[in-house]
Structures are given as C-alpha cells and as structure tokens.
Image (tube, rainbow, N blue to C red):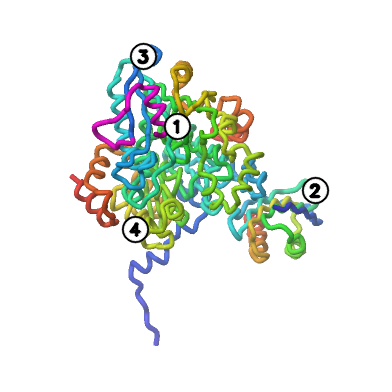
Amino acid sequence: MTTTVQLSEDVLALSTRRSYIEMNARARAAQLLDAGAFRELLGPFDRVESPWLPMQGIVPQWDDGCVVAKGTIDGVPAVAIALEGKFQGGSIGEVCGMKMAIALALARQDCERGIPTRAVLSLESGGVRLQEANIGELVIAEIYAELIALRKYVPVIVVIAGMTGCFGGMSLAAGLASYVVMTRQARLSMNGPEVIEQEAGIEELDARDRPLIWSICGGAQRHATGLADMLVEDDVAEIAHAVRTLFKRGQPARLRSDAHDLYIERLGRLDPAQEWTADQIRAVCKEQMP
Amino acid sequence: MEKLSFEYPASDEKPKRAHVGVVGSGDLEILLEPSQDAKAHVTVQTSVSGFAETWKAVLDRFFANYQGATIFDIRDCGATPGTVAMRLQQAVEVSRQ
Amino acid sequence: MSRGRIWFEALSGSSGRQSDGPGSLLLAEATLGGERVSYVALAPDAQARFPRARGGEVGVEEGWYGARTIRRIIDADGDSTKRPIVTIVDAKSQAYGQREELVGIHLAAAALISAYAEARVAGHPVIALIVGRAVSASFLVLCGQANRVLAFDDEQVLVHAMYKDAAARITRRTVEELDTLGATIVPMAYDIQSFDKLGGLYRLLQVASPDEPNVGTVEQVKLAVIDAIADARRGPRDLSSRLESEGAKQYRKASLIVRTKMAEQWTAQ
C-alpha cells in the first residue's frame, strides 16, 4: 500500500528557495539584474587587478573582488555592483574601489543625459583593504561622492546579505544609500565586533558572543530600528523582488542621512550613562513613529 | 607567494574562454582561454610555496584526460588537490557550454 | 589641549563652544581674506555624554550635530556668496562602542559626510586642514569630501586607514613588517610625506613649532588656506582634482586605467 504525502506550501517554498548568500559576487550581480541582461565591465578576462597585492606576496584576483555589470532592472537601464566577500574579506582596494566609483559616475552621467540609470550595490565588506590603506581611503571618499551625486537622480539601493556583512567604509556607503535591504544573517556596523573588543575591551563587547553581535547590528535589529528598509529571507527571488519593489517606490521622501532632527531626538531619548539594550533602541524607535 | 609554470601537449581543439572560482581561503580562481599553439600552458600563482610536486601531480592527472589548446591561469589560495581538480573540471565544463 | 583645539582657537579667535550639541564640536565664524568663513573642528571633551567619545573621536553626536551645523551654514548662505567651510582636523578616529553601534554610528558618520558633500556641490569651498590625526573614519568624515586638503608636514600628523598596532594585528604582521612594507608600498606608509605622494593633498605646510602657533605661523597658515579657497573656486565642485594630480599620475595608475577602460566598455556594445 502506498501513501501520498501532501507537502504544505511552506515546505514546497523552502525546497525551491535558492540561497543568495551562497552565491558569489558575479552570480549575485546577475540575479539582481533582469534575466539575460548581464554585461560585465572590467571582468576577469580584462585582468585589471591590484598592483599592490603582488608586491607583498598576496595572490590577487582578476576582478579585484568587485563585479560591475550593466543591464536592466524591470526594463530600466541599471548597473549592478557586487563585492566578493570571500576575496580579502571584500575589502576595498584601489581597483575594486575605483570600479565602484566609476560605475556610479557613469550611471550619473547617463542620468544627466536623460537616460535614468539605476544602481544596486551588493555590499559584503570588512572595509578598507589595509594592504592598500591610503589609496583605499581616497577611493572610498570618491565612492561616497559619486553615490551622493547619483542618488539625486535615481534611488541607490544597497543589499547586505552575509555572511561577510558590511563594515567599515562600506557601512558608511550603506548609510548614504537611498534604501537598504538586509537578510537576518547580514550585519551592518561601522566597526566590526573584533575591532570594538580590541579598542574598547571585552567588557564593552565580547566579539565571540554571536547572539549579542546580531542583536546589535543584524538585519532584524537594523530593520526594527529604521536603519534598513526591508528585511528579507536568504532567497534570490525574494531579494531581487525587494530591490524591484524599492525602485518602483521611487525616491524616498527623505534620505536617511538627511534625518538630522529625527536622530538627534533619538539620542536625546537615550542616556549613554546607562547600559543600553537592543530592545530599548527598538522601543525608542517605535516611540518616534508618527 | 610562488609562481609555477607547466606545459602539456594538446590537440588543436580551441575551447571557449571560461572563468571559475574565487581567490578565497582554500579556493582558487581559474581563467581558461584558447591558446594559439597546440599546447596547454599553465601558470600557477599560489599563496602557499613549496608544493610544486603536488601541483605537477594534479595537473599531470588532469591533462592526461584533457587535450584542449589552452592557457590556464590559476590563482590559488591554499586549495586542496581535490578542490584544484574540481575547479579545473568546472572550468572545462564552462568552456564547453 | 589638542592641536586641533589650539589651531581652531588661533585661526578663528574663538573657543568655538556651542550652546547645543556636544562640547567636542567647535564652530566659529570669522573673517579670512576679507570674507566670512566658518571654522569647524572636533576636540576632546572629557564631559562628553558618550563615554567612548571623550577623546576627540567622531561619534554619533559629532556626526549628527556636525551634519546639522553644516546644513545650517548651507541654508544661511542661501543664494548669496557661499562661504568657505574650513575644518581643522585632529581627530583620533571614530568612536568604538556598543552604544554607538546600536544607535547607528555608521549613519551618523554618513550624515556628516553627506553634509560636507552637499556644501561642496552647492559651491562652498570645503577645506580640510590636517594639523594632527585623520585616521580611518575621521579622515573619511572630516577630509574625504573636501575640495582641498592641506596638512602640516610634521611627525605628529597622521593620515591612515588604521593605527599601526591595530593594523599589524589584523593583517597578522609585526609592526616592523608593516614599516618594511611601507618603505616600498607608498599607500601603506604612515608618514604624511608618503600620503602627499598619492595626490590627495593640495599642499603640505612646513610650519615651525606646530604645537605653539604664533602671529607669524598663524598668518602663514591663513594665507595657505586663502590660496586653497581660491584654487577650489577655480575648479569644479567635485573631487576630480585628486585624480588629476601629479601624485595620482604616478601612484594611482591603476585608478586611471579603470576610469578609462570602464568608460570605453560602458558605451561599447
């Protein structure tokens, strides 16, 4: 005798789910663009790589850990920029950073010519690449300038999925973005937990306390405190859909980085002489909702 | 960091170019491009020095079964022989798509 | 007193203390080269509300109140002459703390970066004068968006992505190894002369006794800032002067290749 097992919709959905986190930068960029509309610029075959890493015995990567691809999103011209978190921790070096900055600049120039060109950035980065230190700093400043210039024309959307997360100089880029999409597994924080523990001591933060880390800067917390616009599952279709939904929304009523009064007021409701909890920040954020 | 070079005889069959992998810990990146001569030219740039013999063994085995006229540019970050063999195979599969 | 505060007071003639906002944020209007300018600086404040932001770091208050300060300057000038905004930079780094991360210091820093960029794009000459430290986020926030960056040519002046001991730990090298690398890899070096080679600075200033400004050195620095302001007004309102510099031609060749090649490939089909 045989029995038929009916799988619930949830289980079926799970089994067809495709992990975005497991994808490399190239695959992510392709998934964020409309199907069949992927044209990579300065890809690995162009062999434009870091001049600095071989000088110190580090094996470079041909795309320097950054994928830039032109395509469309819902038919509108777009550029997808994706960082490879597995190469040098997604850190920003000269070539990697310039690819980002120039891609944003070229998108803006097209906007100025009357061709609105969207930008979506998949950021997995520990920050500046210390092996290229000061050039990294200069290039990151240029990324900011171009992002700020482009976001006047079209929303600039940042996707942070994990597992590398978005730290250091790239966390500030996320702060400048029009919209931020995060998974629960993702983290967004200026300073990584190890750096905080190193600088401020283990009483300030125990970098091995994973639940604590995610409660501070994980996707769920950031979404619940207004620092991310959408919280998504680790699913390619869901993430691509979230990005399209946000582009359809158009320009935000106010950029997060322009909300001085809101955040100054938030600081006023908190007492830094006391310990803070993640729930407390969520509560204050709720209080401030109109 | 160490640079190694190898050469193998090949047929005239020129594959399409292919790229696989990531220069991440325990992984490697391979660029495969058609070669102008009937040979397979392999260059390896690896973060782990002193394993020329191991590389030769893995590559000898691979090229015993692959005769494309190719340039293989390999960037390695401490991958195991198994991972290297897997990526080589993957590169060939991509070149055949 | 930090060098930042010393030079802020010497140049502006004011303590810069504000009635609202953190005590670390200094602001003063003054006359320079015959026009109104605003001076801005961060300095240590032992009474700061945030315990982890008492050493002159860029913390959450500095980010948000700093952004509001710059925005108010932009709004105040409206359609009339855009005054120069001169930031005297001597800031240890960003603030490192759990509270800072909880309340989003990355966004507070982004807010101030955004404000400086808006000021520059609106036509204000944004000048950064590095008299001490500009490391990690304190460089990105206080200098990154400036039209022109000047620095004292002095051992205590430091521009870098990360302090040496921390960088050594993270890259798993010794401090001696970092020094050796810095000798041949210019972007990794810690001296300000090496940073100058990269083309990010408009001028390196030789100032005698930089810890003790006198009438002569104050006049010297003011003239240098006036020159930078004039130069900024002659050029575009973007950061292109950095990539057009002699330093970039020599040390940022890869940047220039990326710029050229990506533009070619962008339009090709």
1 vs 2, front mark: 1
User: Horizontal placement of A229 versus C240: left or right?
Assistant: left
- Compute the Cα span from label 2 to label 4: 58 Å
Q: Are marks 1 and 2 in contact (CB under 8 Å)?
A: no
Front residue of A191/A101: it is A191
| Residue type indicated by callout 3 | Glu
Task: Please tell me which residue is depicted at 36% across the width and 28% down the height of the picture.
Answer: C40
User: Horizontal placement of A139 versus B46: left or right?
Assistant: left
The C terminus of chain A, quarter of image? top left
- Compute the Cα span from label 1 to label 2: 54 Å
Which secondary structure, mark 4?
helix
Establish whether labels 3 and 4 are both on one chain.
no
The N terminus of chain A, quarter of image? bottom left
* Label 1 chain ID: C
Establish whether labels 1 and 2 are both on one chain.
no
3 vs 4, front mark: 3
Relative to B36, residue B57 above or below: below
Q: Mark 2 points at which residue?
A: B37
Start-end of magenta stretch: C1-24
Q: Do the residues labelled 3 and 4 touch (CB within 8 Å)?
A: no
Establish whether labels 3 and 2 are both on one chain.
no
* Label 4 chain ID: A
Task: Please tell me which residue is depicted at 39% across the width and 16% down the height of the picture.
Answer: C32
| Residue type indicated by callout 1 | Cys
User: In the image, which disc is placed on residue A86?
Assistant: none
- Compute the Cα span from label 3 to label 2: 71 Å
Front residue of A195/A287: it is A195
Q: Name the residue under label 4.
A: A215
Q: Mark 3 points at which residue?
A: C35
Q: Mark 1 points at which residue?
A: C143
